[in-house]
């Protein structure tokens, strides 16, 4: 592992653990996700005072954290992709694309992120969406090795949109375990996984 990867991971992990608070919901383009996040600077200030290990943000938000004074602010985990699987209405075309297709790691380097995060969606009957995610991760994996940037993958096994409308986790242990395994096989340094339906089964993951 590149030294710079280890340095960045040390900013995230405290005694092998990391509390990463995600506020990167704006790129989901889903109004129900924005409740409580209307004033992002106020949210960031509150989180900094609470002192989590990291805050997960988009490029357009990240300056609100990184320009704050002080050496004890949380590390930045930057979201580098966006997609429409979170929306309440199922779309005719489901997609997941990187926010910067040409050089997706560059914005994270500019903002001194400790890590980047990308989705690995698995939705019923959406193989094209899954393939897009695999292609995104393949490119990011190469670039992360090139620049020494830790790669966090978020494997998301989701139920059909018709089940309730919108983002709904499928906590089937076998499905979650299999997708997490794929994320690791694709080079994830960190996995951000949803829980299993039965918490006692999570050790399999």
Image (tube, rainbow, N blue to C red):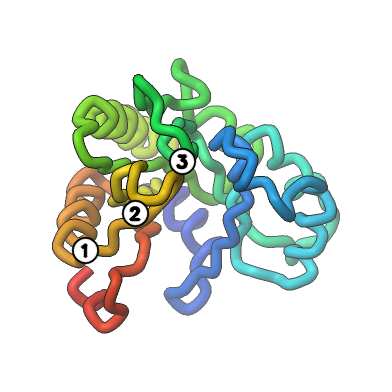
Which mark sits nearer the N-terminus, 3 or 2?
3
Residue depicted at x 29% and y 57%: 170
Looking at the image, tell me whether mark 2 or mark 1 is earlier in sequence order. Answer: 1
Q: Secondary structure at mark 3?
A: loop
The residue indicated by pointer 3 is 86
Dot 2 lies on which element? Answer: loop
Q: Which residue is mark 2?
A: 189
Closer to us: mark 3 or mark 2?
Answer: 3
Asked whether, in this view, residue 8 is left or right of residue 112, the answer is left
Count of numbered circles in the view? 3
Tell me where residue 43 appears, x and y as whole percent. 77, 56
- Compute the Cα span from label 2 to label 1: 23 Å
- Spatial CA distance of label 3 from label 2 is 25 Å
Q: Earlier in the sequence, mark 3 or mark 1?
A: 3
* Picture quadrant of residue 200: bottom left
What distance separates the C-alpha of mark 3 from that of mark 1?
A: 19 Å
Q: Write down the residue under mark 1.
A: 172
């Amino acid at each position: 592992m590149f030294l710079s990867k280890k340095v960045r991971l040390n900013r995230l992990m405290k005694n092998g653990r990391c509390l990463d608070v995600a506020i990167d919901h704006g790129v989901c383009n889903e109004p129900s996700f924005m409740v409580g996040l209307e004033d992002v600077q106020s949210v960031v200030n509150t989180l900094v005072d609470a002192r989590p290990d990291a805050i997960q943000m988009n490029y357009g938000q990240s300056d609100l954290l990184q320009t704050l004074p002080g050496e004890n602010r949380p590390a930045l985990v930057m979201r580098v992709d966006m997609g429409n699987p979170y929306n309440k209405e199922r779309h005719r075309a489901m997609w997941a694309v990187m926010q910067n297709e040409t050089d997706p790691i560059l914005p994270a380097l500019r903002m001194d992120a400790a890590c980047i995060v990308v989705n690995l969606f698995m939705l019923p009957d959406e193989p094209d969406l899954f393939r897009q995610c695999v292609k995104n991760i393949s490119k990011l994996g190469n670039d992360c090795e090139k620049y020494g940037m830790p790669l966090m993958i978020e494997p998301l096994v989701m139920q059909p949109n018709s089940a309730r409308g919108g983002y709904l986790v499928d906590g089937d242990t076998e499905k979650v375990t299999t997708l997490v395994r794929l994320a690791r096989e694709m080079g994830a340094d960190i996995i951000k996984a949803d829980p299993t339906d039965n918490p006692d089964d999570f050790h399999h993951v």
